[in-house]
Image (cartoon, rainbow, N blue to C red):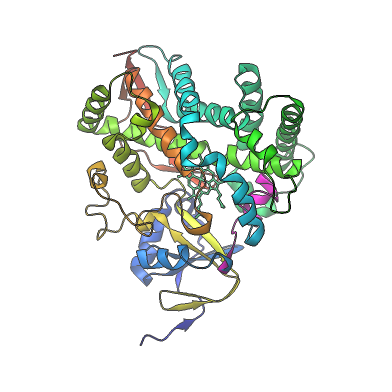
Amino acid sequence: METLRRGTPAGWKFNPLELDKLFNNPGQLLSETRDRVGDPFTVWSPGQSITLTGTPAGARAIFSANPKTFSAFGNGVLSPFLGDASLIVLSGDRHKEERRLLMPPLHGDRMRIYGAIIQDAARTHLSRITNGAAFSALTLAQDVTLDIIIRAVFGVDDAHQVAEVRDAITAKLEASTPWLMFFPALRRPMLGIGPWDHFLKADANARRLLHRTIEAKRTSTTRGADILSLLLDARYEDGSPMPDDDIVDELITLLFAGHETTAITLAWAMYWLHAKPELLERLNAELAAAGASASTDEIAKLPFLSALVDETLRIHPIVPLVPRILEQDFELGGWLLPNGSAIGVSVMLLHQNPVIYPNPTEFSPERFLGKTFSPFEYAPFGGGARRCIGAAFALYEAKLVLAEWLRTGTYSLLDTARPLLERRNITLAPRGGVPLRRVTTSK
Ligand code: HEM
């Protein structure tokens, strides 16, 4: 019988010369480390070390453990940006209760309600791009997904109101730089003009606007099918409503977690469709066969479109690492890791396992056709008690926006080289945003 080793396995020690690699090319750094010392391994950086696994057995151990084994990793990193009541930073019973209130509006059954919003936002933004125009797929996708999440969350159709929320949230997001997030020492006032001062101003402004929106919704006589209406009527087990400050934290969380992730997925999907024209041809044929009158549900179920989105999230896990903090000693891959350590699943390594995914660096949607991977083999949305609550929404949205994108025009890549990665807060995006040119305005 294998004996357990107590402590923390070897791994990568912080080296300022490799900071760019850690931030922008973690896949290479992690696979080199794993190849050198085995799995699990530890990444030590100033202020935080984390033990990682990228095997299905490791993912199973973490995702199927009792939720009480862990607390949220995000506290220090994310709570100043999302708020102390954000689902992402809550732990234990409080996390469970909050999830119970937040899950219903994002349940798979409700997706049909958001279908029209998704298609309308995609059409509006796509119609602004003229024939011959060059544009960033990522910027366009971000405009679309931000509008969609704002309209799904608040139920506002008024263009002025959507623009007001969009500007406030964009300013807050842009002020939440990875440097402020990962280096708390930089969170200091500097004569009112430093990055932290800038963030605090943008944060206060966004929160003021959200409080005003909540108040307006509460006093209005009609409640809609939007997420905010459902949260205002939601009740904890003791019958109490969510306090407004907590609702604001959750709204910020949904806006933050719920748009850039999907936008990055869309930008990568557009890259691969145009880098491999045979995929584009196959998808166009599937969409043409479905017909212009296909319902949003029918589009979301198209097999090749679904496989393409699944493969995009396999090869580019937007959140490359799913972390937890141990609340007790924990067994992982022959180690007994001490209570209090940070551990995580490296989704990047998991998705590059050649035993599960032959030729793992090749973009090949076919691997998802007629095949389902286990939640310990494929985990773009994390797993266990903290699995992404927006997964159904994100997949539905990505498929409908892609279908609209391809139906309303033809495009070509301005640069066919595969984009490098770039870190944006906790996500990784294609550097340069996938520049495209619109070739024709409609087909
Ligand atoms: C392609 C798009 C998306 C990806 C790749 C993604 C990925 C993830 C991942 C990896 C996690 C961490 C899961 C874990 O710790 O096990 C997460 C959590 C979360 N996501 Fe997403 N997400 C996406 C879209 C969305 C959307 C559209 C929403 C909301 C509408 C959303 C809301 C959240 C929330 C609230 C959490 C925290 C869950 C918790 O801690 O209980 N995400 N997401």
Toward the left, the furthest residue is 278
- Is residue 15 left or right of 228 when viewed as pictured? left
Name the image quarter holding the C terminus.
top left
Q: Quadrant of residue 313?
A: top left
Chain part drawn in magenta: 69-88
- Is residue 266 left or right of 178 when viewed as pictured? left
Which of 339 and 426 lies nearest the eye of the viewer? 339
Against 112, residue 63 (above or below) is below
- Is residue 85 left or right of 43 when viewed as pictured? right
Q: Residue at x 38, y 33 (%)?
A: 399
Which of 227 and 130 lies nearest the eye of the viewer? 227
Asked if residue 176 shows in the view, the reply is no
Residue 162 x/y as whole percent? 62, 23
Asked if residue 117 shows in the view, the reply is yes
Residue 343 x/y as whole percent? 51, 65
Against 13, residue 420 (above or below) is above
Q: Residue at x 55, y 32 (%)?
A: 149
Against 101, residue 272 (above or below) is above
Residue 26 x/y as whole percent? 43, 54
Residue 19 x/y as whole percent? 50, 54
**Count of labels shown?**
0
Q: Which residue is drawn at 58% across and 46% down?
A: 178
Toward the right, the furthest residue is 191
Q: Does the magenta stretch include residue 77?
A: yes
- Is residue 1 left or right of 102 when viewed as pictured? left
Q: Is residue 164 magenta?
A: no
Name the image quarter holding the N terminus.
bottom left
Q: In which quarter of the image is residue 46?
A: bottom right
Q: Which residue is drawn at 77% across and 45% down?
A: 189
Which of 194 and 227 lies nearest the eye of the viewer? 227
